[in-house]
Image: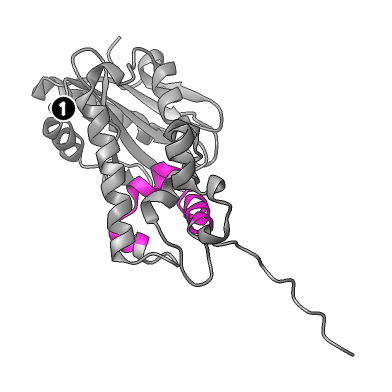
Amino acid sequence: MEKEAKPVQYFPLIRDMAEQDRPRERLIRIGAEALSTAELLAIILRTGGHGESVLRLAERLLVEFDNLPGLSRATITELTDARGLGEAKAAEIKAALEIGRRLVTSAPEERPRVASPDDAFNLLKSEMMFLDQEHLRLILLDTRNRVLRTPTIYIGSLNTSVVRVGELFRAAIRENAAAFIVAHNHPSGDPAPSPEDINVTRQIVQAGRLLDIDVLDHVIIGRGRFVSLKQRGLGFDR
């Protein structure tokens, strides 16, 4: 009995595409804002490899790294571990993302403002709702509550024996932040605060008073919902 032939995968190379459909030519003709994220990334990467077009490579990387935020957080080593990326392409990706980050920080009028727990949740929910580990992040703010950065400080279970409060404030001081909001996710999807969450919050708030950096809130992110410890008076004096 003859074996069934496996279907042939077909990924057309950029040179095989009609000129008007190539990402670079499309950018020149209709503008960068009209291109998909994969097309923009393909222009940065320039070439694919191993029988894979650069557009297919860009699409796969966005899936593997959970879109641009994941690519931005990835180290050079993590990027070069991905099939089709060497050090040169990994460096080009990191350079492009860093230019984007610097553009945001150099144009304060373009930065989002965080004036409520809802703003904090909306800023981070797409990146944090579906993580399978706890991530602790900061929303670093200037004197007008505009976002400076949202760095990840810890990955793993949140408890007072692991979280070094000084690490949070070191990040705030480095960015010259006037205030920050702590945010972490619950992979279970239930944002109800644990006693450990409240203890950590209390320590952070007390340290903020000593260092004269306002800790505005601690937001716990679940699946489609969140809890503000400030609103509930947990770890914060009313």
Q: Is residue 57 left or right of residue 103?
A: right
Residue at 51% in and 60% down: 15
The one of 228 and 142 positioned closer to us in this rendering = 142
For the question of whether residue 156 can be seen, the reply is no
Picture quadrant where residue 195 is located:
top left
Picture quadrant where residue 100 is located:
top left
Report the span colored magenta.
55-79
Q: Which residue is mark 1?
A: 207
Specify the amino acid type for callout 1: Ala
Residue at 25% in and 31% down: 103
Q: Is residue 91 left or right of residue 52?
A: left
Is the C terminus in the top left, top right, bottom left or bottom right quadrant?
A: top left
Q: Is residue 54 left or right of residue 3?
A: left
Residue at 38% in and 42% down: 135
Q: Position of residue 172 (x, y in %)?
A: 17, 31
Q: Position of residue 226 (x, y in %)?
A: 48, 25
Residue furthest to the top in view is 238
Q: Position of residue 179 (x, y in %)?
A: 21, 21
The one of 89 and 195 positioned closer to us in this rendering = 89
Residue furthest to the right in view is 1
Prevailing secondary structure class for the magenta stretch in the rendered image: helix
